[in-house]
Image (tube, helix red, strand yellow):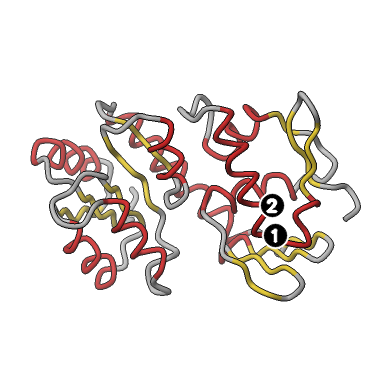
């Protein structure tokens, strides 16, 4: 059975107990807390394999917790699944800038378990992948690192995943819905417009290599075949 350590951050005791019970029954080691401050401390001290994070917390918010974890070299690699009652598109887009997945309440424990498994599979696959070289861009999947002309750039988790998907098949045209499915799994609750938002941010951060990501009018996007 799995032995990954998962940190659950939520101030609703019944939800915490539901998650803890289901994950423990699947063999995960589970640590729980109800505050953002304690979540940051535990993430740094225990180095969990994954964090399940509510957005609305007493003290600092879940978004602020995620920002602190992403800003710290010791915790920036830890996958985050946001679990929240906020379901507006703007909240989802903001959440996906910092997290690996976003699940809205009420939720199915089976769906949460499946999403956790998907995150761990992606993490495992990334660690096994070799570096990707595309023109002046070098991608290190296992370390979630990207260099442009030898200089490291900072990408959100969603931007990084999109870049990996497109660059793995240069010249191949991906529809927006295909990108969502590839990055987040089938039927992920993100609108196609949010893909456009991620692409805009990704191109900007790639700077002189932003044109490597081409728009295919009325269809979607592709990574330039011979950058």
Residue in view at x 35 percent, y 64 percent: 69
Gap in angstroms between the C-alphas marked 2 and 1:
5 Å
Percent from the top left, x then y, of residue 217?
A: 80, 28
Answer with left or right where residue 221 lies relative to residue 24: right
Percent from the top left, x then y, of residue 109?
A: 27, 31
Answer with left or right where residue 218 lies relative to residue 181: right
Residue in view at x 50 percent, y 47 percent: 121
Q: How many marks?
A: 2
Badge 1 density bin: few <14, some 14–19, many ≥20, Cα 10 Å: many
In the rendering, which numbered label is found on residue 7? none
Circle 1 is placed at which residue position?
Answer: 206
Q: Nearer the viewer, residue 43 or 5?
A: 43
Badge 2 density bin: few <14, some 14–19, many ≥20, Cα 10 Å: some
Classify 106 as above or below 122: above
Residue in view at x 74 percent, y 60 percent: 132
Classify 214 as above or below 80: above
Q: Nearer the viewer, residue 72 or 215?
A: 215
Q: Secondary structure at mark 2?
A: helix
Q: Give the residue furthest to the left.
A: 13
Percent from the top left, x then y, of residue 112?
A: 33, 35
Circle 2 is placed at which residue position?
Answer: 203
Percent from the top left, x then y, of residue 115?
A: 41, 38
Q: Nearer the viewer, residue 28 or 39?
A: 39
Answer with left or right where residue 38 lies relative to residue 170: left
Q: Which of the 4 image quarters holds residue 5?
A: bottom left
Contact flag, marks 2 and 1 (Cβ < 8 Å): yes
Classify 128 as above or below 192: below
Q: Which of the 4 image quarters holds residue 73?
A: bottom left
Q: Secondary structure at mark 1?
A: helix
Q: Nearer the viewer, residue 79 or 203?
A: 203
Residue in view at x 16 percent, y 63 percent: 38
Question: In which quadrant will I find the C terminus?
Answer: bottom right
């Amino acid at each position: 059975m799995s032995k990954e350590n998962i940190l659950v951050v939520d101030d609703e005791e019944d939800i915490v107990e539901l998650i803890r019970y289901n994950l423990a029954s699947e063999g995960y080691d589970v640590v729980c807390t109800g505050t953002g401050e304690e979540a940051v401390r535990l993430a740094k001290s225990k180095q969990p394999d994954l964090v399940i994070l509510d957005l609305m917390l007493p003290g600092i918010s879940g978004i602020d917790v995620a920002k602190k974890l992403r800003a710290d070299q010791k915790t920036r690699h830890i996958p985050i699944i946001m679990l929240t009652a906020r379901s507006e598109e703007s909240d989802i887009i903001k959440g996906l800038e910092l997290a690996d997945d976003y699940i809205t309440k009420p939720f199915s424990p089976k769906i949460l378990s499946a999403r956790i498994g998907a995150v761990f599979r992606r993490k495992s696959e990334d660690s096994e992948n070799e570096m990707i070289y595309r023109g002046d861009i070098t991608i290190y999947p296992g370390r979630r690192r990207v260099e442009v002309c030898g200089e490291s750039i900072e990408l959100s988790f969603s931007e990084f995943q999109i870049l990996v998907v497109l660059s793995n098949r240069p010249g191949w045209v991906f529809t927006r819905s295909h990108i969502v499915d590839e990055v987040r799994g089938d039927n992920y609750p993100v609108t196609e417009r949010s893909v456009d938002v991620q692409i805009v941010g990704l191109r900007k951060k790639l700077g002189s290599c932003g044109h490597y990501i081409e728009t295919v009018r009325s269809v979607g996007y592709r990574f330039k075949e011979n950058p």
